């Protein structure tokens, strides 16, 4: 039963992603009428067949990777909503970090170092989201993750005090809401 649930979940996710990415392929031109923006969204039969075929292949290859636990907690739509809301503070932090890096480059106030942070996240998904969020933020780069100890090594453009709070503190509370 677990294998069937994992396969079906992965298949549906892959099909959703495929159809979302090919959304505009059925539109003859991108000039939709403003009063009916969704009326011209059409996928051809071939698109559906190809999407189902690709999704079946993806699901058969990676369902054991995407669904490792039996709780299927990431199938909860509330968690997906939290991920969407999480993108707002992530983009704000990325914008602030861009300005900070530009300032440091112009003034030459750069003291790079590799620091160890302990974000106290237990799931692989949480650590992966945090590592990607840190790497997306200019001025920081995730170098290594020790998932057994929940430690990360980060290259930081300007070393400061309390690296865990300064680098990861703004992300960890959000990531706990959907990944833990």
Image (cartoon, grey):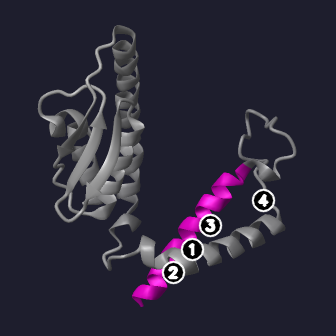
Taking the spot 79% from the left edge, 51% from the top edge, the residue there is: 25
Q: Quadrant of the C terminus?
A: bottom left
Q: Is residue 2 magenta?
A: yes
Q: Is residue 178 visible?
A: no
Which residue is identified by label 3?
Answer: 15
Residue 100 lies left or right of residue 35; in this view the side is left
User: What secondary structure is marked by label 4?
Assistant: loop
Residue 81 lies left or right of residue 42; in this view the side is left
Q: Quarter-wise, where is residue 55 in the image? A: bottom right
Which residue is identified by label 4?
Answer: 43
Whether the residues at callouts 4 and 1 have beta carbons within 8 Å, the answer is no
Taking the spot 75% from the left edge, 48% from the top edge, the residue there is: 24
Whether the residues at callouts 2 and 1 have beta carbons within 8 Å, the answer is yes
Q: Position of residue 7 (x, y in %)?
A: 51, 80
How much space separates mark 3 and mark 1, taking CA atoms? 6 Å
Residue 3 lies left or right of residue 174; in this view the side is right
Q: Quick one: label 4 or label 2, which is nearer the N terminus?
A: 2
Closer to viewer: mark 4 or mark 2: 2
Q: Position of residue 71 (x, y in %)?
A: 31, 76
Taking the spot 17% from the left edge, 36% from the top edge, the residue there is: 163
How much space separates mark 4 and mark 1, taking CA atoms? 18 Å
Which residue is identified by label 1?
Answer: 11
Magenta extent: 1-23
């Amino acid at each position: 039963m677990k294998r069937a649930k994992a396969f079906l979940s992965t298949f549906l996710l892959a099909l959703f992603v495929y159809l979302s990415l090919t959304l505009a392929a059925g539109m003859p031109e991108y000039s939709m009428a403003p009063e009916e923006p969704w009326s011209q969204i059409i996928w051809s039969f071939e698109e559906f067949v190809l999407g189902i075929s690709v999704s079946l292949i993806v699901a058969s290859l990676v369902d054991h990777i995407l669904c490792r636990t039996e709780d299927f907690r990431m199938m909860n739509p509330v968690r997906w909503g939290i991920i969407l809301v999480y993108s707002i503070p992530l983009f704000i932090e990325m914008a602030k970090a861009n300005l900070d890096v530009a300032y440091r480059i112009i003034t030459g106030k750069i003291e790079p170092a590799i620091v160890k942070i302990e974000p106290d996240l237990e799931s692989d998904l949480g650590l992966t989201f945090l590592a990607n969020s840190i790497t997306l933020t200019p001025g920081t780069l995730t170098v290594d993750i020790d998932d057994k100890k929940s430690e990360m090594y980060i290259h930081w453009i300007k070393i400061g005090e309390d690296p865990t709070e300064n680098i990861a503190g703004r992300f960890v509370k959000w990531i706990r809401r959907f990944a833990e």
